[in-house]
Amino acid sequence: MITEPKKRDVALVVDDSPETLRLLTDALDGAGMTVMVAMDGAAAMRIVDQITPDIILLDAVMPGIDGFETCRRLKREADVGHVPVIFMTGLAETEHIVRGLEAGGVDYVTKPIVIEEMLARIRVHLANARLTQSARAALDVSGRFLLAVSRHGKIMWATPQAQKLLTDNLAAATEDELVLPEPMLQWLEQVQKGKPGSKTPLTASFPDNEQLQLQYMGKLGPNEFLLRLAKDSSTNTSAQFSSELGLTTREGEVLSWLAKGKTNRDIAQILGLSPRTVDKHLEQIYAKLGVENRTAAAAIATSASRRNS
């Protein structure tokens, strides 16, 4: 049986020092990788227009476009945004390390470079990148509308379905960069500070499109939060329940979520209410509908939705 040769990982090395380029090219080639080199940021951008590397080794201090700005530009490219970037720097001060991480780097090594350490870091970040890509690919196939944002609301990544909705509903804060609108930034900040029993809702509507909602799913890292996008018709549905079934606006909202199978605790979190308040609304809903439990109320709600669909 003929087996296909193992695919070689592709590394892009960006450094203005011929000696460093030669050292790394020999080491990476010896480790079984295909190596591309660039001596400045502009050349690196031209390369990634043609080929997507698996990892990028980037000198922090270069003439012209420095490594920090090069990294920011690389991260704006859709095909390169997921590629791990390791900074190489002779600057060991904390402020430079922080600048590299804030620009989108995943790691840094100080010069002079210790080849064994560099190769070990590359193996770790390549493995992590593959796991992340596999997870995102699975989410893409399943049709999940998921995205991750920083604490400042910058979109860090999104599945294709979510990306399309975001592009249609968000204005770019700067060129090639999407951020959440200010009301949602305030909501995200409150969710991050939330404690058990907090009344901050875990779902928020877009200011200009109330049917498009974001749901807080959890924290992925120190500065990465997972959100889910959903097109929800509960606004129209709750108004329909309010008018047709003689409910208040809030009772209509509670019933619409009840009809979707949400528990009292879920409804409380979504609407920013206490569970006790939800219980009281349900008591009023049962009385107005002439039923005794949530199953019967949900059945009436489902029937009303079908009549109006």
Image (tube, rainbow, N blue to C red):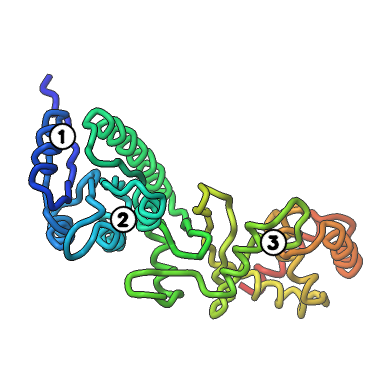
Q: Residues within 10 Å of mark 2 (few under 14, many from 20)?
A: some
Q: Position of residue 271 (x, y in %)?
A: 72, 65
Q: Which residue is mark 2?
A: 81
Quote the CA–CA distance across marks 1 and 2. 22 Å
Q: In which quadrant of the rendered view does residue 255 lie?
A: bottom right
Q: Nearer the viewer, mark 3 or mark 1?
A: 1
Residue nearest the observer in this picture, 195 or 202: 195
Name which residue type carries label 2: Gly
Above or below 247: residue 13: above
Question: Is 98 positioned to the left or the right of 280 in the image?
Answer: left
Q: Nearer the viewer, mark 1 or mark 2?
A: 1
Q: Which mark is residue 277?
A: none
Q: Which residue is mark 1?
A: 28
Name which residue type carries label 1: Leu
Q: Residue at x 39, y 47 (%)?
A: 136
Whichever of labels 2 and 3 marks the residue nearer the N terminus, that label is 2
Q: Secondary structure at mark 2?
A: loop
Q: Which residue is mark 3?
A: 270
Q: Quadrant of the N terminus?
A: top left
Q: Residues within 10 Å of mark 3 (few under 14, many from 20)?
A: many
Q: Residue at x 9, y 42 (%)?
A: 19
Quote the CA–CA distance across marks 3 and 1. 51 Å
The reply to whether the C-beta atoms of the residues labelled 2 and 3 are less than 8 Å apart is: no
Question: Is 227 positioned to the left or the right of 87 in the image?
Answer: right
